[in-house]
Image: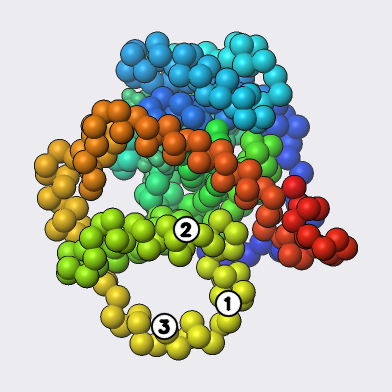
Amino acid sequence: MENGSRRLDMTKEPVKLPEKLAATQAGVVGLGLMGTSIVTCLLAAGHKVTGLDKNPSRRRGLRRRVGKFLREMRREGLLARDPRSVVRNLRSSGDYADLRDCGIVIECVREDLKLKRQVLRKIEEAVPSETLIGSNTSALPISQLQRGAEHPERILGIHWGEPAHVLRFMEVICGRQTSLERAEHVVELARRWNKEPTLVRRDVRGFITNRLMYAMMREAFHLVEAGYATPADVDRSVRNDLGYWITFAGPFRYMDLTGIPAYAAVMRDLLPDLDCGKNVPALMRRVVRAGAKGVSNCKGFYPYTAGQARLWQRLFLKFSYEIRKLALKYPEDVGDRPVKRKNPTARAG
Ligand SMILES: NC(=O)c1ccc[n+]([C@@H]2O[C@H](COP(=O)([O-])OP(=O)(O)OC[C@H]3O[C@@H](n4cnc5c(N)ncnc54)[C@H](O)[C@@H]3O)[C@@H](O)[C@H]2O)c1
C-alpha cells in the first residue's frame, strides 16, 4: 500500500470519525516533557488516559504535573470541567499490558530510532490489531518506524507541538504503509482535541515545520559563524519580521499579500548564496560539548541565572496562551468570508 501514488479527493465530505474512536481510551508511552502535556490534552478532550513510563519517578509525579496544567487550562478558559474530576480519568503504569483497552496509543519516548522501534513493538504486543499507534517523533521517517511491525497500516506520525495542551499545531503523517483512511480518522480526532491538524500524505523526514525550521536554523548559524551578526541580532530580526507575520499568514499566503514577482527575483539571486551545509554547525557542536541544554540548566546561547531561566519559561507559557487567542481571531480562512462590517476581525472571534 503506497500512499505516494494516492491523492486525497479534496472535494469529498470530511471523513466520519467512528464513534467508538471518538470516545476511546487513550495511551501515552513516555511521560517526559511532551508526554505530560499530551496526556493533559487528551484528558481535557474527554478521554480516559493511561500514561506509561519505565521510570517510576516520572509516573509518581504525573498526576501532580498534569493537575497543574489542567488548572492552568481552566484559568485560561480552555477547560469547562473541574480539573479534579478530569484528572480522575488518568491512570499511570509501568506495564504495557495496561494499554490493552486503548483505541489509540501515542509513543513519546526519546528521539532514537532503535528505542522507538522497540517501544512500538511492545505496544503492538499489548493492544488489539485495530488500535491506532501514533509516534510523536520530531523527524524520523514513519516508514522506518513501520519496518518489522505486525500491523504497519495502523502506525502513523502524530507530531505535537510543546506545550501540547495549548498549541493548535498538529501534523498527522502517513508512512509508506499507513492506511490513509486511518490517518483521516486521526485528523478528525485531532479536531476534537482542539487542534488545527495538517495531513502529511507522503512520508518525508522532518515533515513540514521541522524542515522549514531547521533550514532557518542552519542559516542562522551560518550568519553568526561567518561574523555577520550575533545570536541576539539574528533573534531580534527574526522576531520582528517573520515573527510578526507568521502566525497570521504562513509563507504562501504572505507572498500573495506582499506581491509574488519580487520573491521570484530575490530567489534567483539569493538561493545560490544560502548555506547548504550537511553537518551540524561547529558553533552548535561547541555549545553542546560545553554541556549547554538551555534554560533547563541555565546554560545556552545566552547566560541565565536560575531566576531568569524560570521567568523565561513562565513568560513563554503565558505568551503561548496569548498567541493562541490572537490566532483564533484570525482563522486560516478569515479573509475568504463575506465581509459585511467595517472590521472583518469582529466576526472572526
Ligand atoms: N520537546 C519538544 O519540544 C518536542 C516537540 C515535538 C516532538 N518531540 C518529540 O517527542 C519525543 C519525546 O520528547 P520529550 O522532550 O518529551 O523527551 P523526554 O526525554 O522529556 O521524555 C522521554 C520519556 O520517555 C521515557 N522512556 C524512555 N524509554 C522508555 C521505554 N522503553 N518505555 C517507556 N518509557 C520510556 C523516559 O523515562 C522519559 O520520561 C521525542 O521523540 C521528541 O523528538 C519533542
Task: Tell me which residue sits at (36%, 87%) in the image.
Answer: 269
What secondary structure is found at the residue carrying circle 3?
Answer: helix
* Ligand 1 sits in quadrant: top left
Q: Looking at this rendering, what residue extends furthest in the right direction?
A: 340
Percent x, y of residue 38:
51, 31
Task: Say few, some or many: other residues with alpha carbon within 10 Å of mark 3 (under 14 / 14 to 19 / 20 or more).
Answer: few
What secondary structure is found at the residue carrying circle 2?
Answer: helix
Image check: 347 left or right of 60? Answer: right
As measured in the structure, the alpha-carbon distance from the residue carrying label 1 to the one carrying label 2 is 16 Å
What secondary structure is found at the residue carrying circle 1?
Answer: helix
Task: Say few, some or many: other residues with alpha carbon within 10 Å of mark 1 (under 14 / 14 to 19 / 20 or more).
Answer: few
Q: Quadrant of the N terminus?
A: bottom right
Placement of 311 over or under 266, stated as above or below: above
Circle 3: residue type: Met
The mark total stands at: 3
Asked if disc 3 is less than 8 Å from ligand 1, the answer is: no
Provide the residue designation for mark 2. Answer: 243
Task: Tell me which residue sits at (23%, 48%) in the image.
Answer: 301
Q: Is residue 187 visible?
A: no
Percent x, y of residue 152:
49, 43
Provide the residue designation for mark 3. Answer: 267
Q: Quadrant of residue 186?
A: top right
Task: Tell me which residue sits at (80%, 53%) in the image.
Answer: 347
Circle 1: residue type: Thr
Placement of 315 over or under 244, stated as above or below: above
Provide the residue designation for mark 1. Answer: 258
Q: Quadrant of residue 282?
A: bottom left
As measured in the structure, the alpha-carbon distance from the residue carrying label 3 to the one carrying label 1 is 15 Å
Disc 1 to disc 2: CB gap under 8 Å: no
The disc at residue 114 is none
Task: Tell me which residue sits at (24%, 65%) in the image.
Answer: 229
